[in-house]
Image (spheres, coloured by chain):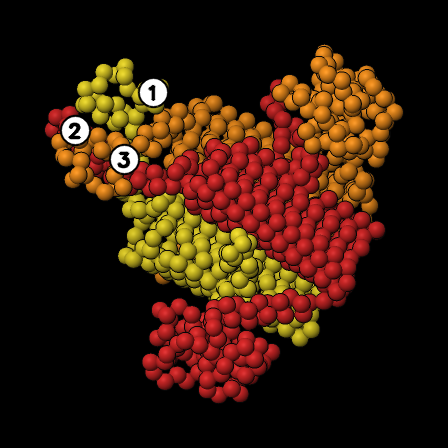
Chain colours: A yellow, B red, C orange
Amino acid sequence: MEFTVQQIADLLQGEVEGDNLVKVSTLAKIEEAQRGALAFLSNPKYEPFLYSTGASAVIVSDKLELKKPVQAALIRVADPYSSFSTLLQYYQTALIASKTGVEEPSYIGSGSQIGDNHYRGAFSYIGNNCIIGENVRLFPHVYLGDNVKIGDNTTIFAGAKLYANTVVGNNCTIHAGAVIGSDGFGFAPQSDGTYKAIPQIGNVILEDDISVGANTTIDCATMGSTIIHKGSKIDNLVQIAHNVEVGSNTVIASQTGISGSTKIGSNCVIAGQVGIVGHISLADKTTVGAQSGVSKSVKETGTIIQGSPAFDYKQNLRAMTVFRKLPELQREVELLKGKPESQQKQGANS
Amino acid sequence: MEFTVQQIADLLQGEVEGDNLVKVSTLAKIEEAQRGALAFLSNPKYEPFLYSTGASAVIVSDKLELKKPVQAALIRVADPYSSFSTLLQYYQTALIASKTGVEEPSYIGSGSQIGDNHYRGAFSYIGNNCIIGENVRLFPHVYLGDNVKIGDNTTIFAGAKLYANTVVGNNCTIHAGAVIGSDGFGFAPQSDGTYKAIPQIGNVILEDDISVGANTTIDCATMGSTIIHKGSKIDNLVQIAHNVEVGSNTVIASQTGISGSTKIGSNCVIAGQVGIVGHISLADKTTVGAQSGVSKSVKETGTIIQGSPAFDYKQNLRAMTVFRKLPELQREVELLKGKPESQQKQGANS
Amino acid sequence: MEFTVQQIADLLQGEVEGDNLVKVSTLAKIEEAQRGALAFLSNPKYEPFLYSTGASAVIVSDKLELKKPVQAALIRVADPYSSFSTLLQYYQTALIASKTGVEEPSYIGSGSQIGDNHYRGAFSYIGNNCIIGENVRLFPHVYLGDNVKIGDNTTIFAGAKLYANTVVGNNCTIHAGAVIGSDGFGFAPQSDGTYKAIPQIGNVILEDDISVGANTTIDCATMGSTIIHKGSKIDNLVQIAHNVEVGSNTVIASQTGISGSTKIGSNCVIAGQVGIVGHISLADKTTVGAQSGVSKSVKETGTIIQGSPAFDYKQNLRAMTVFRKLPELQREVELLKGKPESQQKQGANS
């Protein structure tokens, strides 16, 4: 796809400065852009790149005063970052929307229905009695078990697996390799030391506007539903156990694990590689620092915690500061006790 | 599937109290159950829900004395939890067993054989010279490389991948996206700073009654076998490296990683996000707390460890208790040294 | 495949001692080898096994002086380990190379081309306008989106998913279930508490000689490319976020996560379960210990760090040594303050 700078400017309701017929065919960062690319300048720190960029055109603020001559054509708008984001959105939407129709072989079970304007990639699988909305894209190797329900405008990338009875809302994105609805990890210890599987007959519900990352796993409930509420975003390789409930607009970064029956509030931010034990709850707007281990419920809205086990973020920071100097602290205590330094323990001196 | 309360009671050898012809079609928790659902009451804490539940029927103890009138039909049995578990088991078994036959297109290589009463989903792949037992369910997109052996009554969910030469026992469950038998991570550093792959020609053996979670990875041995012994249960997103040996009836929770050639004993409990270094061994009945990093062998049966690096669980708990108060401890040492508080370091006061 | 000991010796330019017509058909460790297997002895610690091994033949040093009679045939070479590695390499190469041709059904989009001597497994999917080199093996259920480029001699195992525009070099290995090119985790918070997806229109570039482990995820760049430079080796279940750059010959162990826009140097060693924050850089030859959390750039080549947050490896070791004894340290401080032991806090004594 190739556009003139004037066409882009019209779309963004901006004004062109320079050659309005120059053509652009891709989007790039101002510091990396080559001929044919459109870039943007929002952060003043990057202004020096404006005078050296290889971009054919740059979106800039209508208030920017040039300090040197610029080779690229300029498109002046009120908010360059927002305008550029709009273009990115168009670009990505166009890419996804270009996938349409049914590639063969693909499989659709009995009693299943799928709305208009869909894409079903080759080797995609839809079980029996599924109900699928409009504008849905199922990439190759997607698996939908029986009785799966999917809303409108949802995209499921290659090889994601949704077990039977999973429910997905509108405008969701599920990335490649994600597994939704696998059995919860429930085993009852027997008197002979063996374990007996506790049947997991519930399901997973993803509400609207959910994003699930690549190779993330969300287990079905033992009974009832594991629920991710509207607008939450889950990164790659996250584990969400059976009967967990995640509030709306909560963000969970990569490789975090949430154990069974825990309830996470709304508008929480859970950083990467966090572990959260089962059967607790985190208040709305809780922030959990990376690699933390959360072992207790958080009751107050807006709490920030860190550490394994996690506690108040600032308190943890202070404790970690002293932790690094523990050998010195130990030495001071030895000195206070009157021990000559030569008798002190190896660990503190070596 | 719909049953009368009397039919359920007969199955459980229980006695009906109330309307024995009420029909139930699903199982639910007493606090969430709606009309048409069958619930149970085992933990006395939940007794208040008995008088308000929407369930059409509830399984209760034959010793329970009602404190108020109950709308639901009751099924009285000796052990409500156990009876309910039995029903859950029937339910899940019926669901799995309902999958039977071969969906097309599916692929089976030359020289492979598969026992009676199997399910092969569409796009499932069986390589050459595989030997597969009876009552085996291979869901869509399952991949079995050449020479794979699978016992009876094993279920492999959608998209699990078993590399060539993998051996799986009877009554195993492998969840979606699990990868069994991928190359161990072995690279020999060369003098020029590059790495040369060390060929990994061994395999993985899963004995009977193993459960492997979604997107878990178990690498093949460099030579010989990576072995998971009978009855062990492995959660989602676990990493098991080449030449690891896991004893029988050991439970490994989500996102744990076990490095090469380590031997885990029988009846161990490894919590979530644990890391275990290579070439060590853990005694039987070792318990490792969540997020621990195990860097040394554990020799005594029944040891409980925690921390990164992990050591005795209680000792770690005590150390963590002091850790939180390190700034205060540091301040006390400064005071003992006679420094006025104003001269103390920022870290302890801010 | 079955060979006589003489044939193996000729291949390795070694000399046979014992029966040169004995046949071997597999490779095994000297301590585990059975009849029909070929083993090797390199480490003198293992010499006792030489006199008891069940192997039919053993590769030994041409300098080894036997202390007892040996039943196995011996092949004497200059460097037994290197000779054995050569055989392993032959063995594995032969296994992979035995896969050739196209199994049906498989899918190839319009405008895509693939070089000679390739393997395309059943249910493999190649999108539109892909360019694929010679001697490439695509196992069953592999997915290549549109415009993917792959060099010569690259093997992609079952079910790996490469999003559109991914570029892979020569001699790469991508293991089952790996996802390359999924959307970076970028969401802009809106004033109403919701998040808006930031389009991710970049790609992933894997240069030559890269190994990617099973179920590992590598996200595409927001714009531009996420790049893994030549010769780097990535283990299973690793997460590499958008716009990350990994230098050449860097090794990243299992379950490590690298956040967005971070640059890792060349010849680094990142151990398992490490987390690295975004927008930092690690110098060449940085070593990061297992389970570390790296929160700051590392500027000096050859730095070794450990801990969460990570700092100097030796300093961390010393601090951890004192950490274990914190209750005792606290007690000493209490004693110095003159408190009778009975009044001291519970945490330090229990």
Which residue position is annotated with label 2?
C336
Q: Position of residue C206 (x, y in %)?
A: 62, 38
- Identity of the amino acid at label 1? Gln
Look at the numbered discs 1 and 2 and tell me whether their residues touch, using CB distance below 8 Å. Answer: no
- In front of the other: B248 or B126: B248
Q: Position of residue C136 (x, y in %)?
A: 75, 40
- Identity of the amino acid at label 3? Pro
The quadrant in which residue C238 appears is top right
Chain for numbered disc 2: C
Which residue position is annotated with label 3?
C327
Measure the C-alpha gap from mark 1 to mark 3: 18 Å
Q: Position of residue A81 (x, y in %)?
A: 43, 50
Look at the numbered discs 1 and 3 and tell me whether their residues touch, using CB distance below 8 Å. Answer: no
Element type at marker 2?
helix
Quadrant where the N terminus of chain C sits is top right
Element type at marker 3?
helix
Which residue position is annotated with label 1?
A346
On whether disc 3 and disc 2 are found on a single subunit, the reply is yes
Q: Is residue B329 toward the left or the right of residue B267 in the image?
A: left
Measure the C-alpha gap from mark 1 to mark 2: 22 Å
